[in-house]
Image (cartoon, rainbow, N blue to C red):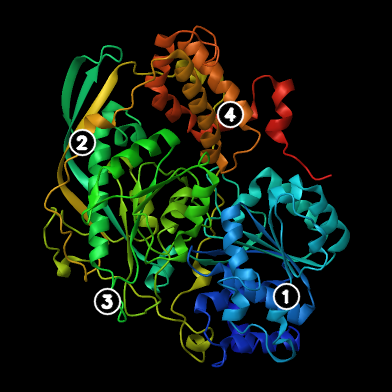
Amino acid sequence: MNYIFRPHEANFRQWCVDGYPGIPETGRAFLKHLAAPDFTPPLWPHQREAIQRCIYAFEILGMRDVLTNVVTGGGKTQIIGGLIAYLMTVHDITQHLVLVPNTIVRARLVDGLRLGGKDYVFAQFPFFTGNNADLPSRLATHIMEPGASAAGIRAANIIIGNVHQLYGEKDNWRVIAENCDRLAIYNDEAHNTRAELYNDLIDKLKPKRFFRLDTTATPDRLDGLHPDSEMIYVYGIREAMRDKRVKRVVVFQPEIEKVKFTYYDWETKQEVSAEEVPWEAIESRRIPAVRYTMNAGPMAQQIGIAIECLRHQRLTVPRSKSDGKPTYKPLLFVVALNIQDAEAITRTLEEEMLDGEPVKVLLIHNESEDELKEEAMSINRDIRNCKYDAIVSVMMLREGWDVKNISAILLFRKFCFTQVGDMKFSVYGPQVIGRGLRRITQDPDTWEQCHVIDHPIFKHDWLWEMIEAYKYPESLNPGDLIDEAKIPQPRVQGELELGESRLGDEKPDFDFGSLPPVPEPEIFEPLTDWRAYLDDCQYDLKGMTISQTIAQVLSRNLDSGLDTLDASELPAIDASALSTEAPTALPELREKLVKRVRELARTALLEYDGQADTRQEILLRVIHEHLGRRFLAGVGPHDCGSVQSLQLVWQVFDQVKANFYNPRLVDSILSSPPGANEHAEQARQALRPA
């Protein structure tokens, strides 16, 4: 996404130095108050600068739709709260609509923006002063919920809801259309605004909006699209780690000497061949990364490394002065690509022991019971006594799920990026890592850290470079001491008070005007003929088991205060017990396979643009037809009566998934869907408000 504020940097800095001229006097007083000694607790410098830039863009530059790109854990709710207070105080804007993409993000903002919420921003920060000092106790908040009356919108100062509640509940839209004429709009996790529902809603609201603020940590999507607002501020993971606003990321991955492939007949399970290759030759095997890491042997080893990282993290937790117990319980967050993989990972984790107890795992995905989803949402309420050791998630806990004691993240999926020149753009990678970035404390003298367990087959070096994960220059065997002298020292970004360091003849430490323009991400070219692509796909019909020889453990970005991994060997795991056999009874096999196809249609869309909407029906039809053409004599899985044919599909299904997780394929299918008369409308249009 293009950073449009560059030509205005110098003037903005001078405007801050000069005391904010050119805006209403009440606005100048508001901004001076933010920097005053009696504004306690103080805002972080980047939060205050984000608010200042929004006001400058609106009041001086006339921008009405702006975006701040602020890292997860960087306090976006406080920025929203500051703008609400400014617009109420200076421009008498009494109604503020806060849009969210899902219920997880909504719950966080309800806690921060509703009177009585545990993180009520106006109780924590004195944004309102003088005659308005009592406003925080009088602000009315309306939460859009399914089936709830929309009448509360009329009298509400803050209205919180997701876009589907404006479409699905026509009364919500009608009340806003009839009663909200001077509306400030805040669009959290704004990278979702390029989805059709968001596009349509934002367009319909524009005649009513007085000002709009989009906030996100990942504005650029893999499809090349981004919000239609103007990006005026960027505060990313690199800057936040240097400022110690978020945890410092530590990346572990195994160093593999060689890999053994054993092939077997999928019906008889008899070995038919075996070969061993050095790791350097792994690319010639053309094995999808997820298929490789989810094979029993590599998966067990990755989980073993993750358990050691979690055990090590627990040894570093400070003790409470009052009772001598750890101040929090570190948790492991595991990211899987689909439900079947997540279930296999969960079974393996539950066989592990940690501190003498079996590992307690919470598995969460879109088909989980509501009480489990609520349990995932409540973990942050008591970070000392959480009953779980690990949370395994499939696409569910990416945005808005903010659990401070996530101390290790285990990856069983590959992240992708779009590259234009030297610039890389990614959404899901930074989002997932963001789940572990929030700090437990804000002690400026300590580095908190999050361990990430990666695998070299994912080729994630671009991501670790993007977030500035320093590399330990030598390999590290489990149990080895780390040579602190060889650890690159982290760069610490000083706290910059706006204007002060640029007074007089001082030369700015960075010349913003010399930066080249940031290119817009290219939209990837779709496949020209998705039918031919699917017909040409090659599938390996032999079963395969993989074992890998790990030479040592590589560590990156290690903190000097933590100098051992405290691991002598990987735990013994019975990899053979992890294999999931296909059901043998026809009704069960057919039912479970159809369920897997339905889940693939959903997750393929989430991989494509993050929106699992009605277009699932298009992908569902294509997947069924593809399986019928290639494996089932022209019929879909739901109609096939051959156990042997369905079991074959079961065995190769991970390869089918790898095909449909290709965004170029999905883009081509949606651009030219099958049965155009039947499906074209739902491919292009979403539900629209009446």
Residue in the foreground of this view, choosing between 371 and 8: 371
In the visual, does 634 lie left or right of 564?
A: right
| Residue under pointer 3 | 324
**Rendered location of residue 156, percent (x, y):** 77, 68
Q: Residues within 10 Å of mark 2 (few under 14, many from 20)?
A: few
Decide: few, some or many residues near mark 3? Use Cα within 10 Å; few <14, some 14-19, many ≥20.
few
**Dot 2 lies on which element?**
helix
Residue 130 in the image, given as x and y percentages of width and height: 71, 92
Sequence-wise, which precedes: disc 2 or disc 3?
2
Pointer 4 residue: 668
Question: In the image, what residue occupies the spot 15% across and 70% down?
Answer: 485
Mark number, residue 280: 2
Q: Earlier in the sequence, mark 2 or mark 4?
A: 2
User: Relative to residue 532, is residue 542 drawn left or right?
Assistant: left
Q: Position of residue 193 (x, y in %)?
A: 65, 51
Res 530 visible: no
Quarter occupied by the N terminus:
bottom right
- The label shown at residue 672 is none
Q: CA distance from mark 3 to mark 1?
A: 41 Å
> In the rendered image, which residue does mark 1 sit on?
139
